[in-house]
Image: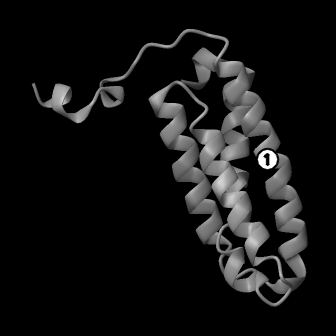
Amino acid sequence: MAARLGSAGVALRSAAMNAGAVRGLAAAATEGGNAAEARSLYRRFLRAANGFGDYNLREYTKRRAGEEFRAHADAPSDKIATLLTRGANELEVIERQAAISKLFKHVNSVMDLPSKKRME
């Protein structure tokens, strides 16, 4: 996959790995009032991931964002602002990559078919 996307794939992989630097911050962020911001950022990651036409990229981005958000669930409150800022920067990268991926034709995966057609 990365070979097909070249540097775009590398940037996407890097963004997806770092994207989750914010998940679970809602619990730690309640003290600073950033819980809503952390949840909003996570939802924006999921929406941005849906912008990929390719099933594999879409699901990989969602999965990595969730993993990374959970990995930082108990981040110290002094690092929350830094993680939110880093997450926002990574979100911009994912949104750009999703926009770029729409410019190119992709082949639908079997997983993109409705479940009834997959069973036939």
**In the image as oriented, which residue stretches furthest toward the left?**
120
Q: Considering depth in this image, is 10 or 72 the residue closer to the camera?
A: 72
Q: Position of residue 10 (x, y in %)?
A: 70, 31
Measured from the top left, where is residue 61 in percent x and y? 58, 43
Task: In the rendered view, tell whether residue 73 sits above or below residue 82.
Answer: below
86 lies above or below 1? below
Q: Is residue 84 above or below residue 96?
A: below
Horizontally, residue 16 falls left or right of residue 83, namely: left
- Quadrant assignment, res 15: top right
Name the residue carrying label 1: 90
**Quarter assignment of residue 100:** top right
Q: Which residue is pictured at 74% across the width and 72% down the height?
A: 36
SS under mark 1: helix
Q: Position of residue 21 (x, y in %)?
A: 73, 63
For the C terminus, the quadrant is top left
The residue that appears at 78% across and 68% down in the rendered structure is 37
